[in-house]
Image (cartoon, helix red, strand yellow):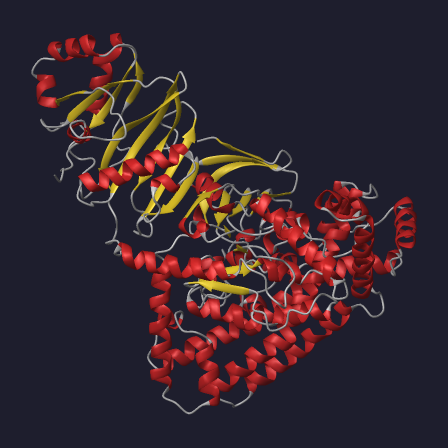
Amino acid sequence: MILEFGTKAETLATLNKVKLSAKIPFSIYFSYKEWMGGNHGIIKSVHDNILGRLIVRSSCMAEDSHSQSNAGAFLSVANVEFGFLESAIEQVFSSYGEHPDDNDQVLVQPMLEHVVLSGVAFSHDPSSCSPYRVINWYEGDNTAFITSGCGGKIWISSSHVSSDKIENPYISQVIKLIDELLVYFGGVPVDCEFAFTKSDDCLTLWLLQARPLILKSRSDPDHEHYKRLRQIADKVELGMSEHPFLMGKRTVYGVMPDWNPAEIIGLRPKPLALSLYRELITDSTWAYQRNNYGYRNLRSFPLMLHFYGMPYIDVRLSFNSFIPANLPDNVAGKLVDAYIDRLLDKPYLHDKVEFEIVYSCYTLDLHQRLQSLKNEGFSEREISTITEHLKTLTNKIIDPELGLWKEDASKLDILKERRERLLQSSIGKLDTIYWLIEDTKRYGTLPFAGLARAGFIAVQFLKSLVSVGVFTQHDYDCFMNSLSTVSGQLSHDRDILSKELFLNKYGHLRPGTYDIESPRYDEAPDLYFDWNSSTSNAASMSSPFSLTLNQMKSISALLRDHGLKPDVVGLFDFLESGIELREWSKFEFTRNLSDIIALVGSYGESLGFSKSEMSYCDISVFKELQVGAMDPVDAIRRSIDVGMSRYKDSLKIILPPVITSPDDVWAFELSEANPNFITQGVTTGHVVTDSNKDHFSGAIIFIQSADPGYDWIFSYPIAGLVTAWGGANSHMAIRAGELGIPAIIGAGEVLFKKWSSVSRITINCAAKKVDILS
């Protein structure tokens, strides 16, 4: 028997007649016509049948239909005492409009008592339209918490996961209920509200509402969805075993550990962006740099793989690459396994692995930090061995005369000179694209990777100065604010340069550095800047920082006692240069990258392809066209078709930020992240997204990533910044700290969605706290 949806009240009444694993509260409902015809009998019926407090709920003809849900559009009144019942009913009918339809209804039920958990559940994910059971719940007695948009926990599982396979008893029962509703309503996607009550240790599931779930397109057949997830799970399974050339018994996959793809190209990048990131960095450049700087040789291992176009970092590879090259294999393997166990224990640290999980360099507080290894089975001798190898490696990097970062910095001038020669030459676009790619790897991303490593080491060393008591947090902040960065220079130049000169210098930047569909600054300058006002957030170019005599003496003694090569002057030259050059090298190599993307777009346009179409093209096709004689239209069209198909598949898949086993592909809880709070400040403001720049003044701006192309945001007088993705050492973290703007970098999907859906918040960075005001 296939049931039909009706109004809220009618659907519950229909479901009350069939066998369900959930209970439905006793209900009395009536139409507007019946109410206006005389309400005495209705009031008496409620009095005679329902004891205690009541909830008066909307059940309008305009809600819960197959075409629109109008969820939350009409009033419901909770905790109503019987004496106020008539008034509450009038309020609900009034919320339908000035002239309610005669058939509009109101539903009266008892207020549930001893509620321990409540939420909403979907049979399909509304965004992807795929058959995922999505459950959003809140632990507590407020049944309106989730429906009011205040967040809560989120569980996602494929329709192929049986309810009896799920350990959480709450989730298991709700999924069973969803499956029952799908059967009764003939497979029509369903949206329901539920609550659990607990009395005398007896747990009861209540169904509070069921309605059709309105999807923007039809869901794929279950077998197609299963096929995709099966292939991903099989790929993950391969990483759960040992590899002959790697330390560590198994791996973990994440969207943020090491080179942060979620931050730089997004969770579902178009194929051109994904292939460019692989080509320029994660296929080989990343490993060459690590090995050059004294870490283990991981050459020929691609760091990033993708699941139907969704990029993930192979964490075992990353952790191997942070091991000093000459560390004995037995200690190295033990260390990699310890790192992986730490991440498995605290997966929310996936965007902080270098600060919270691995030991990638020597610092003044390393001895104290390494003590935790004793609890992980390491002997004093092994810890001493790790210490000495990290010290040797670090000395090689920070050497004041022969430091590896100095050679990397010199390559940026070669990159610039070769780029100018290429762009002024008469070679064709394909040759120019090819050589810009090769030069970007050799003279751009390779030295950038090295300078980024130097920057990470510099920040860790600065933090250790705080840890050992030589610096206060204020000293640390003052040093960071004293640095001359690209962002600071941009803000300064925005005020003093003409529009033409400014765009000549910074015009290659774009939000979404690898995204061909994101306009460069010089392609849409008025989209990003208000040329009639100054940059209100622009800090002075830099505030001088100086050490006290006591600090210099303390640091000098520490360097000597720890066996580190530089003197105080040499150390601070490294600390300053490492952080500054990280930003400048990124600025320079993205000139090449931006020109590559522009040439790909113009070449495609010459063959009749739009930028949107070219975003689905893999960059490898241009390398093939450069070396072979073939029909370029046919080659690009085939690449676009393959890329478009894969991208469409990626939109139908939901995966967790950290995948620890094949089971995570099928079902997972989206846990809250551990965000990075920048500055010690407090700020309050309205929540505004980056697409609404007219309301930036005094607002807290929400953007997906900490991409440097979003630097234009700081030309407005914003009150704060929140990003979904980004690490403590990301570009926007440094920039916010430099300007003293309270910011949250890397909020994660759950918190970002929660905070961005409200109107006004307060961010307290010192307390690491966010308050929702409205």
Residue 464 picture location, percent across and down:
78, 47
Residue 182 picture location, percent across and down:
23, 42
Does residue 197 lie above or below 743 as drawn? above
Residue at 83% x, 50% y is 546
- One can see residue 292 in this view: yes
Residue furthest out toward the bottom? 629
Q: Quadrant of residue 69?
A: top left
Residue 312 picture location, percent across and down:
51, 59
Q: Is residue 709 left or right of residue 203?
A: right
The N terminus sits in image quarter: top left
Q: Nearer the viewer, residue 71 or 758?
A: 71
Q: Is residue 379 left or right of residue 206?
A: right
Residue 42 picture location, percent across and down:
14, 13
Residue at 50% x, 57% y is 529
Q: Is residue 201 left or right of residue 347?
A: left
Q: Nearer the viewer, residue 604 or 556?
A: 556
The C terminus sits in image quarter: top left
Does residue 393 lie above or below 21 as drawn? below
Does residue 258 lie above or below 82 as drawn? below
- One can see residue 429 in this view: no
Count the labels in the image: 0
Q: Nearer the viewer, residue 212 or 186?
A: 186
